[in-house]
Image (spheres, rainbow, N blue to C red):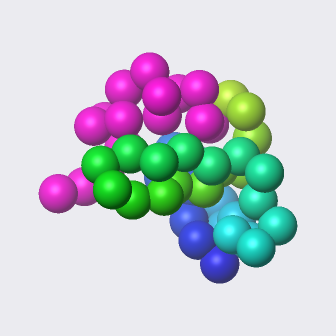
């Protein structure tokens, strides 16, 4: 299981249809809304 970086919900990466590559990593999302929020400002949701 992976954590949605926007809302924190657990996402099964094996079944996830909403995912995005960014900075060499793959991020998984529970909804299109979370994916859109991440796309708009990914650095807001990535901890360094």
Residue 15 counted in the magenta span: no
- Tell me where residue 34 appears, x and y as whole percent: 62, 36
Q: In which quarter of the image is residue 11?
A: bottom right
| Residue drawn at 73 percent across, 33 percent down | 32
Relative horizontal placement of residue 25, taking residue 46 as reference (left or right):
right
Mainly helix, strand or loop, the magenta region? helix
- Tell me where residue 10 appears, x and y as whole percent: 67, 68
In depth, the one of 44 and 14 nearer the eye is 14
In depth, the one of 31 and 8 nearer the eye is 31
In depth, the one of 3 and 22 nearer the eye is 22
Q: Quadrant of residue 20?
A: top right
| Residue drawn at 76 percent across, 59 percent down | 16
- Tell me where residue 7 appears, x and y as whole percent: 57, 48
Relative horizontal placement of residue 2, taking residue 38 as reference (left or right):
right
* Residue at the extreme left: 48
Q: In this view, does 7 lie above or below 35?
A: below
Count of numbered badges drawn on the protein? 0
The C terminus - image quarter: bottom left
**Where does the magenta region start and end?**
34-48
Relative horizontal placement of residue 8, taking residue 9 as reference (left or right):
left
| Residue drawn at 30 percent across, 49 percent down | 23
Relative horizontal placement of residue 40, taking residue 31 as reference (left or right):
left
- Tell me where residue 1 appears, x and y as whole percent: 65, 78
């Amino acid at each position: 299981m992976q954590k949605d970086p926007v809302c924190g919900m657990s996402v099964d990466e094996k079944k996830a249809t909403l995912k995005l590559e960014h900075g060499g990593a793959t991020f998984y999302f529970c909804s299109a809304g979370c994916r859109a929020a991440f796309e708009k400002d990914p650095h807001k949701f990535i901890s360094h």
